[in-house]
Image: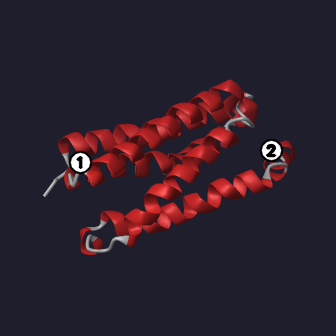
Amino acid sequence: MVAMDQVFASHTELTLAHILPALVFVIVVPFALLRRFSHLLWPQRLLFPLGAVVGITAYAMSAYPIGGWTERSAVLFFNTLFLFSLVRAWIYRMQGRRIEERRWLLRSVVVLLGIATTRPVMGMFFATSTLTNLTPNQFFGIAFWIGFSINWIVIEIWLRWGYESA
């Protein structure tokens, strides 16, 4: 655990440059997605630049993975998916295609929130480590793949079969 803390502490500026815009992104998201705030312009004006900063800094943070290449591959894959979704949402926004913009913005948000899903998965790995003998270096990457994948699968199911575009 001390080694993990040292990894984050040695890159404090990068960690803060990633986490703080991500926090603001998550706070602004409801104002961009909820229909009762659809008349507001500032959420979208903030959301897209914040998302770009979060994505760029996530690439930089992947240079220091605790879980090695497995974690790095999950971060690179899902961060690319996040930025792709965000760019698609922005393009649809510029075209005035609000339904498509909303669907792709939801995808980007869900990918970003995948890190929150990863945490309980890591907790399960930590809780069972005495049985499995897995160390954080071994299970962090697996937890990242599981957490982010759960979110992506759920949003795709919801968008395809449960989402109302009206």
Q: What's the CA distance linking mark 2 and mark 1?
A: 40 Å
Decide: marks 2, 1 in contact (CB < 8 A)?
Answer: no
Q: Is residue 38 left or right of residue 135?
A: left
Residue 150, compared with residue 6, is above or below; it is above
Badge 2: how crowded within 10 Å, few (<14), some, or many (20+)?
Answer: few
Give the residue type that dot 2 points to: Met
Badge 2 is on which residue? 4
Q: Is residue 135 visible?
A: no
Residue 154, compared with residue 36, is above or below; it is above
Q: Quadrant of residue 71?
A: top right
- Disc 1 element: helix
Badge 1 is on which residue? 100
Q: Residue furthest top?
A: 69
Q: Quadrant of residue 68?
A: top right
N-term mark: 2 or 1: 2
Position in image of residue 41 (x %, y %): 34, 71
Viewer-side residue, 84 vs 137: 84
Q: Residue furthest front?
A: 94
